[in-house]
Image: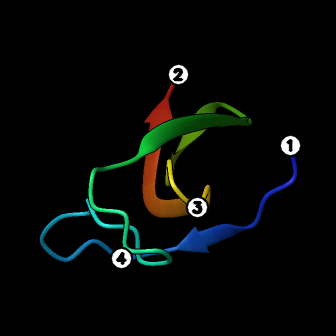
Amino acid sequence: MDYKVQHVTIEDEFKVCPSCGYKDGFHSLLKKEQDRFKWFFICPSCHEVFDVGYTVEM
């Protein structure tokens, strides 16, 4: 899958897509990188991928 990841900073909440304005939340994507997973969010409307800085340790 080929996609560009946009980095965003969460201020109070991250529910509205900054690209298209979709207002009902996001799908999740976990991508393995060495000994952890990066947790990305995907807009169900425009399919943009966002990185808010979350990781999950294994």
Q: Amino acid at mark 1?
A: Met
Under circle 2, the secondary element is loop
Q: Quadrant of residue 10?
A: bottom left
SS at mark 1 in the image: loop
**Going from the N terminus, do you reach mark 2 or mark 4 first?**
4
Amino acid beneath label 4: Thr
Q: Nearer the viewer, residue 49 or 38?
A: 49
User: Is disc 3 placed on a helix, strand or loop?
Assistant: loop
| Label 2 vs 1, first from the N-terminus | 1
**Which residue was labeled with disc 2?**
58
Q: Earlier in the sequence, mark 4 or mark 3?
A: 4
The x and y percentages for residue 19 are 50, 77
Task: From the image, tell me which residue sits under label 3.
Answer: 46
Coordinates of residue 8 in the picture (x, y in percent):
44, 75
Q: Which residue is mark 1?
A: 1
Q: Earlier in the sequence, mark 1 or mark 3?
A: 1
Name the residue at 47% across, 74% down: 20
Tag in front: 1 or 3: 3
Tell me the number on the disc at residue 31.
Answer: none
Q: CA distance from mark 1 to mark 3?
A: 15 Å
